Amino acid sequence: MNLIDRLRQKRRERIRRLYERQKRIHALLREHGSDILNSENFRGTRRHIQHGNMTVYSHVMNVARYSLLLNKKLGLGCDKHDLIRGALLHDYFLYDWHDKTQIPQRKRLHGFWHPGIALRNAEREYKLTDRQREIIRKHMWPLSVVPPTCREAWVVTTADKYCSLMETIGLHKGHGAMAS
């Protein structure tokens, strides 16, 4: 086998491993979050832009994926059920934060207020564990002032910061809001 064939074989193998990893991640998301993924309100997050042209839906899906990858890569032993559900619901504020007419004047500092709003919305629709509440409430640390106290919240907070940065500078590209 010549050099070109070996390089092609390595590339095919790398693509196959990436595909298999994505399949495992999607299976975990469905296993632990199918009720969230299938809910009307959650699907509605496809209509709101989060960062750049990334929708809230795409953002939280990315955060959930990266949270799982961080947990595995660092061997943190996080509870996958809480990690996935907290990541999917961390930005469950259900409004367009760019539209200032939807937000009362006193709550226009979206970064400070949305974790509490997301938590209230999530508690109305889902039975949450203490860890899931912690993830949602504290994912905006240091804006939330009190730092996370569980591994899962730290992982989601870190993944959220990474994804937000990549989306804002345009390295993670979304496809804009979709009509429902």
Image (cartoon, rainbow, N blue to C red):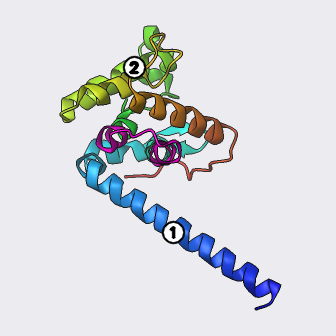
Q: Is residue 67 above or below residue 103?
A: below
Q: Which residue is mark 2?
A: 149
Q: Is residue 18 above or below residue 174?
A: below
Q: Is residue 148 magenta?
A: no
Label 2: which secondary element: loop
Most distant residue in the bottom direction? 1
Instruction: Name which residue lies at 62% across and 41% down.
Output: 167
Residue type at mark 1 is Tyr
Instruction: Name which residue lies at 25% across and 25% down.
Output: 130
What is the magenta segment's predominant secondary structure? helix
Could you classify mark 2 by the number of other residues whose Cα lies within 10 Å: few (under 14), some (14-19), or many (20 or more)? few
Query: What number is the disc on residue 109?
Result: none
Instruction: Name which residue lies at 41% across and 14% down.
Output: 104
Q: Is residue 16 above or below residue 76?
A: below
Report x, y in % for residue 154: 46, 28
Q: Is residue 74 magenta?
A: yes
Residue 14 occupies quadrant: bottom right
Most distant residue in the top direction? 106
Q: Which residues are magenta?
A: 65-85
Label 1: which secondary element: helix
Q: Which residue is mark 1?
A: 19
Report x, y in % for residue 47: 43, 44
First in sequence, mark 1 or 2: give its number. 1
- Between marks 1 and 2, how big is the CA–CA gap? 34 Å
Instruction: Name which residue lies at 51% across and 39% down.
Output: 49
| In-front residue for pair 140/21 | 21
Residue type at mark 2 is Thr
Report x, y in % for residue 116: 35, 19
